[in-house]
Image (tube, helix red, strand yellow):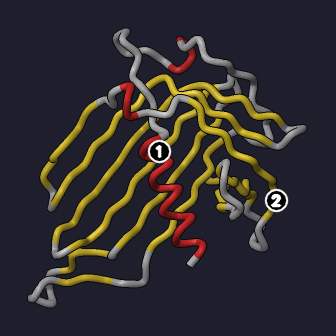
Amino acid sequence: MKKIFLSAAIVCAALLGACQKSKTTKASATACSNPSAPVSAALQGNWMYGNFSMTEYWTQNPADYLGNALQFAIAFKFNADGTYEQYFTSSSVTLGVVTYQQSVSKGTVVIDETNKTVKTYCCTSRYKRTKNGHVEEERDLNPSEITTLSTYNYTTGTEPNGTKAIYLTIAGTTSQLKFLQKF
């Protein structure tokens, strides 16, 4: 139950942690004046976390599958130059309505390997929500909707199958989320 609660907190943090889009056209994360630091080779790359419920939904017609009750994924891409990208996606089925939410945030990152913290500073973000396949909202987030700084504590390790992992803990929580390295 704690994992479900923590997972819900992660979903909220991911949505609210998305960042403001720069006023300049096609601004890049490197154009931000936010703090950044080079990322060590051991932490560079793609790191993914995901979860889903065991409940499945169909319409009255058993041939029409609606989807999983709740599923979501969060991914980080940490680049050597101190920039990052964060991807979030979720889908849920409620009362026969399938809702997808997605966001892509880009910015700068400072990873303190001594104190085991990751600080992400947003520069740009894009949000999209669809219901039953129709786009309901697709836009840049407003400044009042964003959190420009997110802080995580972390440890690293290797899973039994040999996959490298970063175990992130969001500030104010105690459970670690396992982000696996993807190539």
Would you place residue 133 above or below residue 162 in this image? above
Q: Please rate how many residues cluster around mark 1, counting C-alpha atoms within 10 Å: few if below 14, some from 14 to 19, many from 20.
A: many
Q: Which mark is residue 157?
A: 2
Residue found at the far left of this picture: 61
Q: CA distance from mark 2 to mark 1?
A: 22 Å
Residue 132: % across, % down:
15, 62
Residue 94: % across, % down:
23, 72
Rendered residue at 38%/34% (across/down): 145
Residue 33: % across, % down:
59, 11
Residue 144 is drawn in which quadrant? Answer: top left
Rendered residue at 69%/21% (across/down): 36
Would you place residue 25 above or below residue 103 in this image? above
Rendered residue at 28%/43% (across/down): 128
- Name which residue type carries label 1: Tyr
Label 1, on which residue?
87
Residue 152 is drawn in which quadrant? Answer: top right
